Image (spheres, grey):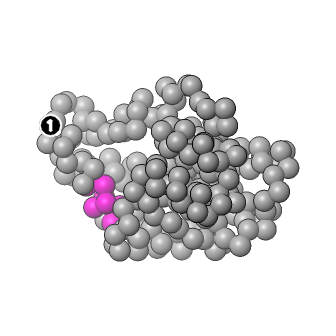
Amino acid sequence: MIAFDFDGVICNTNPILEGHFFDIYGENVKKNQTIYEFKTVKPNPCFDETYWQEIPVAIVNYQHIAPAVHGSIEALEAFWVDYDMDYIQIITARESSLSVKQVTYNWCDRHFRFPYKIRYCDNSEDKQQIMLDMGVDIFVDDRFKTAQCLSSVLSVSYLFNQPWNKRDTKLNDNVQRINSLWEMKHDLDTSQYPG
């Protein structure tokens, strides 16, 4: 089974998070270009201690304006059709509150023309257990730590290139970098993945 992460792979959530952080903290906040975290331009202890709590708030308030990652929707539809999938399986570490789930489903309903299912989890270790329980053998994520962690239970763990994972160059043998879901599909097509 093939499954996909949501944020940073299907949906470009960073702009809504950065905008929300600016509204809350009054300064530009950018995702660190070398690791998976956000930083203020000037040191701000209040931000460092509280920004993770603001992520679900930003998602609830602004998910509706978040763009799709370029080409992701079309590639997912091609996966669904070409691999005769019953649905596209998404596994995300988003908070699983009712309000976050609702805006996530609304976004997917607005963008997808194919059936999908979403599983929510808390962290990389939870994702790993879900992979085992569901029989997922191929997954794509934008977090280096997650791609590495999941590689122990996957045939192929794809790492979707993003600025925050490019400094991490030592990959496990079955972790493969991609620049798009189309590239992942091409790789699977040429390896004659049975789907």
Q: In this view, does 61 lie to the left or right of 181?
A: left
Q: Mark 1 points at which residue?
A: 45
139 above or below 57?
above
Q: Residue at x 26, y 39 (%)?
A: 28
Q: Which residue lies furthest to the left in this view?
A: 46
Image quadrant containing the C terminus: bottom right
Residue 121, image quadrant: bottom left
Q: In this view, does 176 lie to the left or right of 31?
A: right
Q: Residue at x 70, y 46 (%)?
A: 155
39 above or below 168?
below
Q: Which residue is drawn at 53% across and 52% down?
A: 128
Q: What stretch is highlighted in magenta?
A: 54-60
Q: Residue 167 location in percent, x, y?
A: 49, 26
Q: The residue tagged with tag 1: helix, strand or loop?
A: helix
Q: Residue 186 location in percent, x, y?
A: 78, 46
Is 55 contained in the magenta span?
yes
Image quadrant containing the N terminus: bottom right
Viewer-side residue, 86 vs 113: 86
